[in-house]
Image (cartoon, helix red, strand yellow):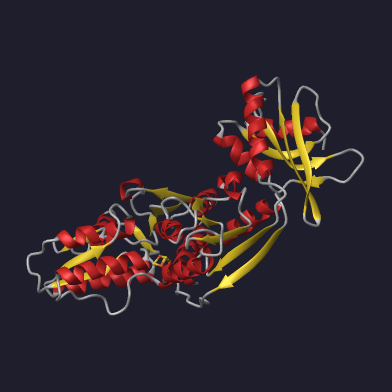
Amino acid sequence: MSFTAAQSILAANNRGRPDPGAVLVAEDLLWPDRPSVPCPAGVLLEGELRRRGVRAGRGPLHAEADRGAVALRSVFRAGDHTAGLGAAITGSPSPELTERVCGAMAACLSAAGTARTVLLAAPRSFCAGVERAIEIVERLLAQRGGPVYVRKQIVHNVHVVRDLECRGAVFVDELSEVPPGAAVVFSAHGVSPAVRTEAKRRRLEVVDATCPLVTKVHTEARRFAARGDTVILIGHAGHEEVEGTLGEAPRRMVLVQSAEEARKLEVPDPQRVSYLTQTTLSVDETAEVVEALRRRFPALRGPASDDICYATTNRQDALKAIAAESDVVLVVGSKNSSNSVRLVELSRRAGTPAHLIDGPPDLRPEWLIDAKVVGLTAGASAPPRLVNAVIAAMGGLGPVKVEERETSRETIHFTLPATVRS
Ligand code: SF4
């Protein structure tokens, strides 16, 4: 493909209009007389450019192109293969734009040429509750076609949501946005009884994708409240799961977010107190909060088995196994994913810098400059393919050896609701 054709990719990205200020990032560097050079780290360069306020798109780039454009390229050894980085600025770039593109290239090249080991945590990525929730929406789409309405994000991951949107799912914040009589899916995080009542009032067909382990906590909330306890929910204010659980017994439940809050808590009858937790909390921090509650209320009762779910616990254990050996830890997950954010915090508490990335474009080359060992994991709502994409992008900067550290094996699988089972 010629450079002119490559420029047309940018035009295509700009809905057919020429985009003179845009930058083409090479997916491959092409020469007329020798083999092309792949540029797996182009996705990192694209991210770096966007952070510098530059519009960028990826496509093949003719390495000798210079007609009406500024082209930058670099080819280097990445272990047993050759990799490249390249960018071309279309039109007549301003000095500021040229400087930003050069800066982004320099940032990527500063992390290139180093051999790295990736310590891959296992388990990581999708849990059984997330797989079930996604499959429910997929099956509804296959059975009925779009639109399929989903209340809130089905799971907290931008890629999952975008992918399902492209296939016909419509994500709404309120049930009032769902046409009367239509089917609506409740997300994996669960809903309060008030939302169920509202769905009934609007005659909506509910397909419930609430994770069974969240449902367990709801059941406990009702049981503990029914025996006359003040039910303390340990969790984060505003999280959908917390809002749903608190809704089970709003007059009897109180939210506690930290050990500090636990120490100051007042309840009507200290002899009748129980606690529950959000499913995706830090195991260690929650133990501190429970300990503080126990000291304040010696009669405190808890759930028969931990509310922090197996997937959260396993991913934290796996992270602990790699963090100490890593120079930096990358956690693939979205910002609103509670269990992903906890993994970042856990690594930092262990003394290893950690970063939450939604995918390869968020990975800043500067984080890799002195990193010979990179810990890599993903929160329970992050698709496994993103982990592979991060490894592939790093492989574009230098040789990467992947070592998986498995701390437990997950075999849990939840059955689907009858509506979508056939
Ligand atoms: Fe269920 Fe735990 Fe997965 Fe949440 S993280 S969906 S509670 S298994």
Q: In which quarter of the image is residue 245?
A: bottom left
Residue 311 in picture, x, y percent from top left: 44, 70
70 left or right of 420?
A: right
Q: In this view, does 414 lie above or below 368?
A: below
Q: In this view, does 249 lie above or below 156?
A: below
215 left or right of 332?
A: left
153 left or right of 274?
A: right
Q: Is residue 314 above or below residue 397?
A: below
Q: Which residue is drawn at 80% across and 26% down?
A: 66
Q: In which quarter of the image is the N terminus?
A: top right
**Foreground pick, 269 / 152:** 269
Residue 187 visible in image: yes
Where is ligand 1, by quadrant? bottom left
Q: Residue at x 31, y 66 (%)?
A: 286
Residue 163 in picture, x, y percent from top left: 54, 52
Identity of the residue furthest to the right in this view: 33
Q: Is residue 32 above or below residue 394?
A: above
Identity of the residue furthest to the left in this view: 268
Residue 305 in picture, x, y percent from top left: 31, 78
